[in-house]
Image (cartoon, rainbow, N blue to C red):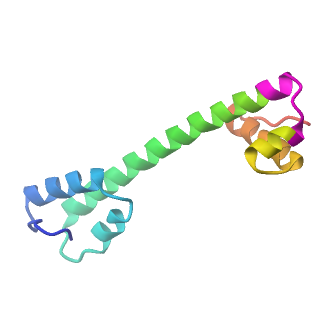
Amino acid sequence: MPDGFKLGTVEQVRAWQRHLQTAPASTLPAAADDPEAGPGVRIAALTLASQARAELEAMLSRHNHAEFALITGLRTEGTAWAQIGRALGTTRQGAAQRAGRLTTRVNGTSTER
């Protein structure tokens, strides 16, 4: 448990909430593993973990949509898979496969290439 945190109080839960909101992800296991942390602390940590997961999933979704739009636009303009692959740090085949996965994630369908 971080220094200066009182055990078993409302202040402890609020202090952990503030700490978890600004702390690295490694703090969540610390809250789980702390034998002196009560249920309030663990609930606060679990709530923040759930919120963080939702934020990460939303960010990944936005990233997938943007990457899909870029690849789709480049292909519409006639850009070769090899060039797209180089930009992605992969091969032309890897780029085409990535585009297929993005199509599924963004549209819920796959396309033939």
From the top left corner, tell me how far across and down residue 75 is, in percent: 84, 28
Task: State whether residue 59 is above or below residue 77.
Answer: below
Q: State which quadrant residue 37 falls in.
A: bottom left
From the top left corner, tell me how far across and down residue 58 is, in percent: 51, 38
> Which residue occupies 38% across, 46% down?
51
- Tell me which secondary structure the magenta stretch mostly adopts: helix
Q: Is residue 68 left or right of residue 29?
A: right
From the top left corner, tell me how far across and down residue 97 is, in percent: 83, 46
Task: State whether residue 96 is above or below residue 5.
Answer: above
Question: Is residue 75 shown in magenta?
Answer: yes
Instruction: Give the mark count.
Output: 0
Question: Which residues make up the magenta segment?
Answer: 73-82
Q: Work out whether residue 84 or residue 52 is closer to the camera in this orientation and state it.
A: 84
From the top left corner, tell me how far across and down residue 7 is, in percent: 10, 68
Q: Work out whether residue 3 or residue 108 is closer to the camera in this orientation and state it.
A: 3
Question: Is residue 19 shown in magenta?
Answer: no
> Which residue occupies 25% across, 55% down?
44
Toward the top, the furthest residue is 77
Q: Quadrant of the N terminus?
A: bottom left
> Which residue occupies 72% across, 39% down?
102
> Which residue occupies 28% across, 50% down?
21
Task: State whether residue 85 is above or below residue 28.
Answer: above
Q: Quadrant of the C terminus?
A: top right
Q: Work out whether residue 52 or residue 82 is closer to the camera in this orientation and state it.
A: 82
